[in-house]
Image (cartoon, rainbow, N blue to C red):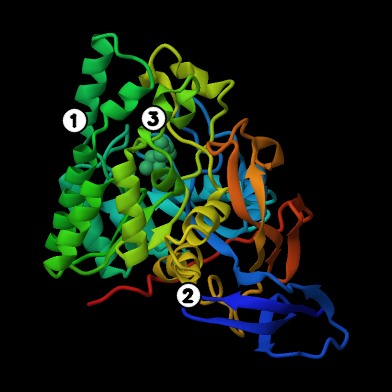
Protein backbone atom coordinates (compact mmCIF):
# COMPACT_ATOMS: atom_id res chain seq x y z
CA UNK A 1 0.00 0.00 0.00
CA UNK A 2 1.40 3.38 -1.04
CA UNK A 3 1.24 6.28 1.39
CA UNK A 4 1.80 10.00 0.94
CA UNK A 5 2.66 12.31 3.82
CA UNK A 6 1.30 15.61 2.51
CA UNK A 7 1.72 19.29 3.28
CA UNK A 8 4.30 18.90 6.01
CA UNK A 9 7.35 21.07 6.68
CA UNK A 10 10.29 18.70 6.34
CA UNK A 11 13.28 19.20 8.61
CA UNK A 12 16.63 17.49 8.14
CA UNK A 13 19.98 18.37 9.69
CA UNK A 14 20.53 20.90 6.89
CA UNK A 15 17.22 21.57 5.15
CA UNK A 16 13.81 23.01 5.92
CA UNK A 17 11.23 22.85 3.13
CA UNK A 18 7.59 22.15 2.34
CA UNK A 19 6.99 18.95 0.33
CA UNK A 20 5.12 15.66 0.12
CA UNK A 21 6.74 12.28 0.77
CA UNK A 22 5.74 9.22 -1.26
CA UNK A 23 6.23 5.88 0.52
CA UNK A 24 6.20 2.47 -1.10
CA UNK A 25 7.20 -0.91 0.31
CA UNK A 26 8.68 0.48 3.52
CA UNK A 27 10.84 3.09 1.79
CA UNK A 28 10.70 6.74 0.90
CA UNK A 29 10.60 6.64 -2.90
CA UNK A 30 10.01 10.25 -3.88
CA UNK A 31 9.85 13.72 -2.34
CA UNK A 32 8.23 16.57 -4.24
CA UNK A 33 5.68 19.35 -4.23
CA UNK A 34 1.95 18.68 -4.68
CA UNK A 35 2.26 14.98 -5.47
CA UNK A 36 -0.93 13.43 -6.90
CA UNK A 37 -2.70 11.14 -4.41
CA UNK A 38 -3.40 8.36 -6.98
CA UNK A 39 -4.25 5.21 -5.04
CA UNK A 40 -2.08 6.18 -2.07
CA UNK A 41 -3.35 6.56 1.48
CA UNK A 42 -2.91 10.22 2.41
CA UNK A 43 -1.53 11.32 5.77
CA UNK A 44 -2.07 15.02 6.23
CA UNK A 45 0.78 16.81 8.00
CA UNK A 46 -0.45 20.38 7.38
CA UNK A 47 0.82 22.79 10.02
CA UNK A 48 3.28 20.18 11.30
CA UNK A 49 6.97 19.41 11.11
CA UNK A 50 8.08 16.12 9.54
CA UNK A 51 11.39 14.73 10.75
CA UNK A 52 13.23 11.41 10.56
CA UNK A 53 12.31 8.87 13.23
CA UNK A 54 14.55 9.53 16.21
CA UNK A 55 17.20 6.96 17.05
CA UNK A 56 18.27 6.23 20.63
CA UNK A 57 21.73 4.68 20.68
CA UNK A 58 21.86 4.25 24.46
CA UNK A 59 19.13 2.17 26.08
CA UNK A 60 19.10 -0.68 28.60
CA UNK A 61 15.96 -2.72 28.00
CA UNK A 62 15.52 -5.67 30.35
CA UNK A 63 18.95 -4.99 31.87
CA UNK A 64 19.98 -7.38 34.61
CA UNK A 65 21.97 -5.35 37.16
CA UNK A 66 22.34 -8.24 39.59
CA UNK A 67 20.25 -6.80 42.43
CA UNK A 68 17.28 -6.29 40.07
CA UNK A 69 16.22 -5.99 36.46
CA UNK A 70 15.22 -2.90 34.46
CA UNK A 71 11.43 -3.03 34.34
CA UNK A 72 10.95 -2.26 30.64
CA UNK A 73 11.44 -5.34 28.52
CA UNK A 74 11.85 -5.00 24.75
CA UNK A 75 8.07 -4.73 24.31
CA UNK A 76 7.17 -2.10 26.93
CA UNK A 77 10.37 -0.18 26.35
CA UNK A 78 10.03 0.01 22.59
CA UNK A 79 6.32 0.91 22.80
CA UNK A 80 7.38 3.81 25.04
CA UNK A 81 10.15 4.71 22.60
CA UNK A 82 7.76 4.68 19.63
CA UNK A 83 5.24 6.88 21.44
CA UNK A 84 8.04 9.37 22.01
CA UNK A 85 9.02 9.46 18.33
CA UNK A 86 11.92 7.00 18.49
CA UNK A 87 11.85 4.42 15.71
CA UNK A 88 15.15 2.61 16.34
CA UNK A 89 17.27 1.84 19.36
CA UNK A 90 20.76 0.49 19.83
CA UNK A 91 20.71 -1.25 23.19
CA UNK A 92 23.73 -1.88 25.39
CA UNK A 93 23.94 -5.61 26.04
CA UNK A 94 25.08 -6.18 29.62
CA UNK A 95 25.74 -7.86 32.02
CA UNK A 96 26.19 -11.63 31.92
CA UNK A 97 28.16 -13.99 34.15
CA UNK A 98 31.86 -13.13 34.49
CA UNK A 99 34.07 -14.50 31.71
CA UNK A 100 31.39 -14.84 29.03
CA UNK A 101 32.18 -14.29 25.33
CA UNK A 102 30.49 -11.42 23.48
CA UNK A 103 28.45 -13.80 21.35
CA UNK A 104 26.84 -15.20 24.49
CA UNK A 105 25.44 -11.71 25.17
CA UNK A 106 24.26 -11.51 21.58
CA UNK A 107 22.38 -14.82 21.85
CA UNK A 108 20.75 -13.75 25.11
CA UNK A 109 19.72 -10.33 23.82
CA UNK A 110 18.40 -11.65 20.52
CA UNK A 111 16.02 -13.83 22.48
CA UNK A 112 15.02 -10.92 24.71
CA UNK A 113 14.19 -8.69 21.73
CA UNK A 114 12.82 -11.06 19.08
CA UNK A 115 9.05 -11.24 19.00
CA UNK A 116 8.80 -8.31 21.41
CA UNK A 117 10.43 -5.18 19.99
CA UNK A 118 7.98 -2.97 18.09
CA UNK A 119 10.69 -0.81 16.52
CA UNK A 120 13.96 -1.73 14.83
CA UNK A 121 16.89 -2.47 17.12
CA UNK A 122 20.60 -3.06 17.16
CA UNK A 123 23.00 -3.89 19.96
CA UNK A 124 26.34 -2.76 21.32
CA UNK A 125 28.54 -5.43 22.89
CA UNK A 126 29.89 -4.92 26.41
CA UNK A 127 33.44 -6.02 27.15
CA UNK A 128 33.32 -7.39 30.69
CA UNK A 129 36.93 -8.55 30.48
CA UNK A 130 39.65 -8.53 27.82
CA UNK A 131 41.63 -11.48 26.46
CA UNK A 132 42.57 -12.86 23.04
CA UNK A 133 39.17 -14.43 22.55
CA UNK A 134 37.28 -11.20 23.24
CA UNK A 135 39.60 -9.25 20.94
CA UNK A 136 39.04 -11.63 18.05
CA UNK A 137 35.31 -11.67 18.78
CA UNK A 138 35.19 -7.90 18.30
CA UNK A 139 35.91 -8.61 14.66
CA UNK A 140 33.29 -11.34 14.26
CA UNK A 141 30.72 -9.27 16.15
CA UNK A 142 31.33 -6.43 13.67
CA UNK A 143 30.73 -8.85 10.80
CA UNK A 144 27.51 -9.92 12.53
CA UNK A 145 26.31 -6.28 12.51
CA UNK A 146 27.63 -5.11 15.89
CA UNK A 147 30.61 -2.85 15.13
CA UNK A 148 30.63 -1.18 18.56
CA UNK A 149 31.52 -2.20 22.07
CA UNK A 150 31.02 -0.60 25.46
CA UNK A 151 33.62 -0.40 28.19
CA UNK A 152 32.75 0.54 31.75
CA UNK A 153 35.42 2.25 33.82
CA UNK A 154 33.41 1.63 36.95
CA UNK A 155 30.88 -0.91 38.30
CA UNK A 156 31.60 -4.61 38.73
CA UNK A 157 32.95 -5.23 35.22
CA UNK A 158 35.25 -2.24 35.04
CA UNK A 159 38.20 -2.48 32.68
CA UNK A 160 41.73 -1.33 33.48
CA UNK A 161 43.89 0.89 31.27
CA UNK A 162 45.66 -2.03 29.56
CA UNK A 163 42.28 -3.60 28.71
CA UNK A 164 41.04 -0.30 27.34
CA UNK A 165 44.14 0.25 25.22
CA UNK A 166 43.85 -3.20 23.64
CA UNK A 167 40.18 -2.70 22.84
CA UNK A 168 40.85 0.70 21.32
CA UNK A 169 43.64 -0.67 19.14
CA UNK A 170 41.49 -3.54 17.92
CA UNK A 171 38.45 -1.36 17.26
CA UNK A 172 40.59 1.11 15.34
CA UNK A 173 41.88 -1.76 13.18
CA UNK A 174 38.36 -2.93 12.29
CA UNK A 175 36.75 0.53 11.87
CA UNK A 176 34.70 -0.03 14.98
CA UNK A 177 33.90 2.34 17.80
CA UNK A 178 34.22 1.98 21.57
CA UNK A 179 31.69 3.60 23.91
CA UNK A 180 32.86 4.48 27.42
CA UNK A 181 31.12 4.99 30.72
CA UNK A 182 33.65 7.33 32.30
CA UNK A 183 33.98 7.61 36.08
CA UNK A 184 37.03 7.09 38.28
CA UNK A 185 36.10 3.83 40.01
CA UNK A 186 38.50 4.06 42.97
CA UNK A 187 37.44 7.61 43.83
CA UNK A 188 33.75 6.71 43.62
CA UNK A 189 34.12 3.56 45.72
CA UNK A 190 36.19 5.36 48.34
CA UNK A 191 33.71 8.23 48.66
CA UNK A 192 30.70 5.90 48.76
CA UNK A 193 32.17 3.89 51.63
CA UNK A 194 33.37 7.00 53.46
CA UNK A 195 29.96 8.66 53.33
CA UNK A 196 28.23 5.48 54.31
CA UNK A 197 30.51 4.95 57.30
CA UNK A 198 29.69 8.49 58.42
CA UNK A 199 25.97 7.73 58.27
CA UNK A 200 25.47 9.86 55.15
CA UNK A 201 23.09 7.54 53.34
CA UNK A 202 20.44 9.78 51.76
CA UNK A 203 20.25 10.23 47.94
CA UNK A 204 22.23 13.49 47.86
CA UNK A 205 25.29 11.48 48.98
CA UNK A 206 25.04 9.51 45.76
CA UNK A 207 25.84 12.75 43.92
CA UNK A 208 28.54 13.71 46.41
CA UNK A 209 30.22 10.32 45.90
CA UNK A 210 30.54 10.89 42.17
CA UNK A 211 32.00 14.40 41.74
CA UNK A 212 32.41 16.15 38.39
CA UNK A 213 36.15 15.67 38.46
CA UNK A 214 35.81 11.90 38.95
CA UNK A 215 34.04 11.85 35.60
CA UNK A 216 36.34 14.38 33.91
CA UNK A 217 39.46 12.49 35.03
CA UNK A 218 38.15 9.30 33.43
CA UNK A 219 37.16 11.14 30.25
CA UNK A 220 40.62 12.64 30.02
CA UNK A 221 42.24 9.24 30.65
CA UNK A 222 40.21 7.53 27.93
CA UNK A 223 41.00 10.29 25.47
CA UNK A 224 44.72 9.95 26.18
CA UNK A 225 44.50 6.17 25.74
CA UNK A 226 42.69 6.68 22.44
CA UNK A 227 45.47 8.99 21.37
CA UNK A 228 48.00 6.29 22.21
CA UNK A 229 45.94 4.02 19.95
CA UNK A 230 46.46 6.37 17.01
CA UNK A 231 43.27 8.41 17.50
CA UNK A 232 41.06 5.34 17.83
CA UNK A 233 37.38 6.30 17.76
CA UNK A 234 35.94 7.04 21.18
CA UNK A 235 32.31 7.64 22.07
CA UNK A 236 31.73 9.10 25.53
CA UNK A 237 28.29 8.09 26.80
CA UNK A 238 26.17 10.27 29.08
CA UNK A 239 28.65 13.12 29.50
CA UNK A 240 27.20 15.14 32.36
CA UNK A 241 29.40 18.05 33.40
CA UNK A 242 31.35 21.12 32.35
CA UNK A 243 34.77 19.72 33.27
CA UNK A 244 34.30 16.65 31.05
CA UNK A 245 33.26 18.84 28.15
CA UNK A 246 36.36 20.97 28.70
CA UNK A 247 38.52 17.82 28.55
CA UNK A 248 36.92 16.90 25.21
CA UNK A 249 37.42 20.40 23.82
CA UNK A 250 41.05 20.44 24.94
CA UNK A 251 41.78 17.08 23.26
CA UNK A 252 40.20 18.34 20.05
CA UNK A 253 42.17 21.60 20.29
CA UNK A 254 45.31 19.50 20.42
CA UNK A 255 44.26 17.88 17.15
CA UNK A 256 42.86 14.58 18.42
CA UNK A 257 40.34 13.12 15.99
CA UNK A 258 37.49 10.67 16.28
CA UNK A 259 36.01 11.87 19.56
CA UNK A 260 32.23 11.56 19.76
CA UNK A 261 30.18 12.81 22.68
CA UNK A 262 26.71 12.01 23.93
CA UNK A 263 24.67 13.63 26.65
CA UNK A 264 21.13 12.86 27.85
CA UNK A 265 18.08 15.04 28.61
CA UNK A 266 18.40 14.47 32.36
CA UNK A 267 21.82 16.15 32.39
CA UNK A 268 20.47 19.09 30.38
CA UNK A 269 17.33 19.61 32.43
CA UNK A 270 17.54 18.25 35.96
CA UNK A 271 19.89 19.23 38.79
CA UNK A 272 21.14 17.65 41.99
CA UNK A 273 18.39 19.51 43.85
CA UNK A 274 16.26 16.49 42.87
CA UNK A 275 18.19 14.37 45.39
CA UNK A 276 17.03 16.55 48.28
CA UNK A 277 13.38 15.92 47.42
CA UNK A 278 11.30 13.34 49.21
CA UNK A 279 11.39 11.17 46.07
CA UNK A 280 15.14 11.68 45.53
CA UNK A 281 15.68 7.94 44.95
CA UNK A 282 14.02 8.31 41.53
CA UNK A 283 17.09 10.19 40.32
CA UNK A 284 19.80 7.80 41.43
CA UNK A 285 21.70 7.24 38.22
CA UNK A 286 25.34 7.37 37.25
CA UNK A 287 26.79 9.82 36.57
CA UNK A 288 24.52 11.74 38.95
CA UNK A 289 22.59 14.92 38.20
CA UNK A 290 24.81 18.00 38.45
CA UNK A 291 24.30 21.77 38.86
CA UNK A 292 22.56 24.41 36.76
CA UNK A 293 25.99 25.60 35.66
CA UNK A 294 26.67 22.15 34.21
CA UNK A 295 23.28 22.08 32.45
CA UNK A 296 24.04 25.46 30.89
CA UNK A 297 27.47 24.26 29.72
CA UNK A 298 25.91 21.18 28.11
CA UNK A 299 23.28 23.22 26.26
CA UNK A 300 26.09 25.42 24.95
CA UNK A 301 28.06 22.32 23.91
CA UNK A 302 25.02 20.96 22.14
CA UNK A 303 24.42 24.22 20.29
CA UNK A 304 28.04 24.67 19.18
CA UNK A 305 28.54 21.05 18.05
CA UNK A 306 30.91 19.95 20.85
CA UNK A 307 28.28 17.35 21.76
CA UNK A 308 27.02 15.31 18.80
CA UNK A 309 24.33 13.05 20.21
CA UNK A 310 21.49 13.17 22.71
CA UNK A 311 20.52 9.65 23.80
CA UNK A 312 18.67 8.60 26.97
CA UNK A 313 20.47 5.87 28.96
CA UNK A 314 16.93 4.59 29.54
CA UNK A 315 17.25 2.17 32.46
CA UNK A 316 14.01 2.22 34.48
CA UNK A 317 13.31 0.85 37.96
CA UNK A 318 10.04 1.38 39.79
CA UNK A 319 10.08 4.03 42.48
CA UNK A 320 7.52 2.02 44.41
CA UNK A 321 9.65 -1.13 44.37
CA UNK A 322 13.24 -1.50 43.13
CA UNK A 323 14.30 2.07 43.94
CA UNK A 324 13.15 1.54 47.56
CA UNK A 325 16.09 -0.81 48.03
CA UNK A 326 18.03 2.41 48.56
CA UNK A 327 15.73 4.02 51.13
CA UNK A 328 18.15 3.54 54.04
CA UNK A 329 21.33 3.45 51.96
CA UNK A 330 21.83 5.11 48.58
CA UNK A 331 24.50 2.54 47.64
CA UNK A 332 21.82 -0.21 47.61
CA UNK A 333 19.61 1.59 45.08
CA UNK A 334 19.73 0.27 41.48
CA UNK A 335 21.23 2.96 39.24
CA UNK A 336 19.23 4.25 36.32
CA UNK A 337 16.14 6.21 35.29
CA UNK A 338 13.54 6.14 32.51
CA UNK A 339 13.63 8.59 29.60
CA UNK A 340 13.18 6.83 26.26
CA UNK A 341 9.70 8.30 25.71
CA UNK A 342 10.38 11.85 26.86
CA UNK A 343 13.52 12.67 24.84
CA UNK A 344 12.16 14.20 21.63
CA UNK A 345 9.41 16.13 23.42
CA UNK A 346 11.93 17.56 25.89
CA UNK A 347 14.47 18.49 23.25
CA UNK A 348 11.83 20.22 21.15
CA UNK A 349 10.17 22.01 24.03
CA UNK A 350 13.19 22.93 26.16
CA UNK A 351 15.67 23.16 23.30
CA UNK A 352 14.04 24.40 20.10
CA UNK A 353 10.97 26.21 21.45
CA UNK A 354 13.10 27.99 24.06
CA UNK A 355 15.68 29.03 21.46
CA UNK A 356 18.59 27.02 22.88
CA UNK A 357 19.11 24.91 19.75
CA UNK A 358 17.77 25.02 16.21
CA UNK A 359 15.46 22.45 14.70
CA UNK A 360 18.39 21.35 12.52
CA UNK A 361 20.48 20.61 15.61
CA UNK A 362 17.60 18.65 17.07
CA UNK A 363 17.38 16.47 13.96
CA UNK A 364 21.14 16.12 13.80
CA UNK A 365 21.62 15.07 17.44
CA UNK A 366 18.55 12.84 17.80
CA UNK A 367 18.32 11.33 14.34
CA UNK A 368 21.11 11.76 11.83
CA UNK A 369 24.42 11.91 13.69
CA UNK A 370 23.85 8.84 15.87
CA UNK A 371 23.07 6.93 12.67
CA UNK A 372 26.24 8.10 10.96
CA UNK A 373 28.37 7.28 14.00
CA UNK A 374 26.85 3.87 14.60
CA UNK A 375 26.41 2.64 11.02
CA UNK A 376 22.64 2.97 10.52
CA UNK A 377 22.77 5.79 7.98
CA UNK A 378 21.24 6.40 5.43
CA UNK A 379 18.56 3.73 5.93
CA UNK A 380 17.84 5.41 9.28
CA UNK A 381 18.14 9.06 10.30
CA UNK A 382 17.42 10.56 6.88
CA UNK A 383 14.51 11.83 4.82
CA UNK A 384 15.55 11.03 1.26
CA UNK A 385 14.62 8.53 -1.44
CA UNK A 386 15.90 5.07 -0.49
CA UNK A 387 15.73 5.68 3.26
CA UNK A 388 13.39 3.65 5.45
CA UNK A 389 10.09 5.47 5.85
CA UNK A 390 10.65 6.14 9.55
CA UNK A 391 8.99 9.48 10.20
CA UNK A 392 7.67 11.64 13.01
CA UNK A 393 4.98 14.27 12.55
CA UNK A 394 5.31 16.92 15.21
CA UNK A 395 2.81 19.70 15.84
CA UNK A 396 4.87 22.65 17.09
CA UNK A 397 1.90 24.77 18.15
CA UNK A 398 0.10 22.69 20.77
CA UNK A 399 1.22 22.20 24.33
CA UNK A 400 0.53 19.69 27.07
CA UNK A 401 1.66 18.63 30.50
CA UNK A 402 4.09 15.75 30.76
CA UNK A 403 2.62 13.30 33.21
CA UNK A 404 3.10 9.62 33.96
CA UNK A 405 -0.52 8.67 33.20
CA UNK A 406 0.00 9.62 29.53
CA UNK A 407 3.12 7.49 29.16
CA UNK A 408 3.52 3.97 27.86
CA UNK A 409 6.43 2.19 29.55
CA UNK A 410 6.17 -0.23 32.47
CA UNK A 411 7.86 2.05 34.99
CA UNK A 412 5.81 3.90 37.62
CA UNK A 413 7.11 7.46 37.16
CA UNK A 414 8.54 10.06 34.83
CA UNK A 415 11.41 12.24 36.01
CA UNK A 416 9.64 15.23 34.41
CA UNK A 417 6.22 14.98 36.08
CA UNK A 418 4.17 18.16 35.64
CA UNK A 419 6.47 19.83 33.12
CA UNK A 420 4.70 22.04 30.55
CA UNK A 421 5.68 20.83 27.11
CA UNK A 422 5.46 22.84 23.92
CA UNK A 423 4.79 20.72 20.81
CA UNK A 424 3.07 17.38 20.45
CA UNK A 425 3.78 14.25 18.45
CA UNK A 426 0.84 13.55 16.13
CA UNK A 427 2.05 10.44 14.32
CA UNK A 428 5.01 8.06 14.26
CA UNK A 429 5.73 5.74 11.38
CA UNK A 430 8.25 2.95 10.94
CA UNK A 431 9.02 1.55 7.49
CA UNK A 432 5.73 3.02 6.29
CA UNK A 433 3.62 1.48 9.07
CA UNK A 434 1.88 3.83 11.46
CA UNK A 435 2.94 2.89 14.98
CA UNK A 436 1.51 5.79 16.93
CA UNK A 437 -1.39 8.14 16.31
CA UNK A 438 -2.36 10.85 18.78
CA UNK A 439 -0.49 9.18 21.64
CA UNK A 440 -2.08 5.75 20.99
CA UNK A 441 0.21 2.86 20.14
CA UNK A 442 -1.29 0.96 17.19
CA UNK A 443 1.77 -1.01 16.05
CA UNK A 444 2.42 -4.71 16.28
CA UNK A 445 4.32 -6.64 18.93
CA UNK A 446 7.45 -8.18 17.44
CA UNK A 447 7.39 -6.10 14.23
CA UNK A 448 10.79 -4.57 15.03
CA UNK A 449 13.76 -6.02 13.13
CA UNK A 450 17.37 -6.52 14.08
CA UNK A 451 19.57 -3.94 12.35
CA UNK A 452 22.87 -5.27 11.05
CA UNK A 453 24.92 -2.12 11.40
CA UNK A 454 27.79 -1.05 9.19
CA UNK A 455 31.14 0.38 10.35
CA UNK A 456 31.24 3.96 11.64
CA UNK A 457 31.04 6.40 8.72
CA UNK A 458 32.56 9.29 10.63
CA UNK A 459 36.09 8.06 11.28
CA UNK A 460 38.91 10.32 10.09
CA UNK A 461 42.36 8.83 9.35
O1 LIG B 1 22.79 4.78 36.24
C1 LIG B 1 22.85 4.35 35.10
N1 LIG B 1 23.23 5.15 34.16
N2 LIG B 1 22.50 3.08 34.84
C2 LIG B 1 22.54 2.42 33.61
C3 LIG B 1 23.87 1.83 33.28
C4 LIG B 1 24.82 2.90 32.82
O2 LIG B 1 25.66 3.33 33.58
O3 LIG B 1 24.76 3.35 31.67
ZN1 LIG C 1 26.77 4.31 32.01
ZN1 LIG D 1 23.86 3.31 30.13
Q: Is residue 139 or residue 458 the one in the foreground?
A: 458
The mark total stands at: 3
Q: Mark 3, mark 2: which one is toward the viewer? A: 3
- The residue under label 1 is 187
Q: Where in the image, quadrant-wise, is ligand 3 located?
A: top left
Work out whether residue 341 can be spotted. Answer: no
The image's mark for residue 273 is 3
User: In the image, what residue occupies the spot 59% across and 83% down?
Assistant: 17
Q: Do the residues labelled 3 and 1 touch (CB within 8 Å)?
A: no
Q: In which quarter of the image is the C terminus?
A: bottom left
Task: Choose the circle earlier in sequence order: 3 or 1.
Answer: 1
- Percent x, y of residue 375: 44, 69
Q: Distance between the residues labelled 3 and 2?
A: 34 Å
Within-10-Å neighbours for mark 2: few <14, some 14–19, many 20+: many
Q: Is residue 442 above or below residue 192?
A: below
Crowding at mark 1 (Cα within 10 Å: few <14, some 14-19, many 20+)? some
Q: Which type of secondary structure does the marked residue at label 3 adopt? A: helix
Q: How far apart are marks 3 and 1 (CA)?
A: 22 Å
Relative placement, left or right, of 97 versus 18 is: left
**Circles 2 and 1: CB atoms closer than 8 Å:** no
Q: Which mark is residue 282?
A: none
Give the mark nearest the N terminus, 3 or 2.
2
User: What residue appears at the point 67 percent right and 58 percent down from the top-left corner?
Assistant: 425
Residue corresponding to mark 2: 13
Q: Where is residue 70 in the image (x, y as percent from the top left)?
A: 54, 34
Location of residue 355 (image quadrant): bottom left
Amino acid sequence: MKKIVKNGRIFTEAEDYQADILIEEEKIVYIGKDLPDGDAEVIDAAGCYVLPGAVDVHTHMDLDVGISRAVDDFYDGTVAAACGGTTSIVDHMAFGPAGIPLHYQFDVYRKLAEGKAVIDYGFHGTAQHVDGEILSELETMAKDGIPSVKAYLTYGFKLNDADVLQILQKMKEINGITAFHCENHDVVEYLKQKHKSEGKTTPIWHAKSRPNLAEAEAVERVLKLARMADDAPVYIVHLSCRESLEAVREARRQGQKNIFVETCPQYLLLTEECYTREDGLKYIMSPPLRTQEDCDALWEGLADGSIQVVATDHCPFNYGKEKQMGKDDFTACPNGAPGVEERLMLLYSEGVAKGRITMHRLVETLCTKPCRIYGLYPEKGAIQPGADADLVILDPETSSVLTHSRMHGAVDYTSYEGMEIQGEIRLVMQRGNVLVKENQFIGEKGAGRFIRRKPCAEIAD
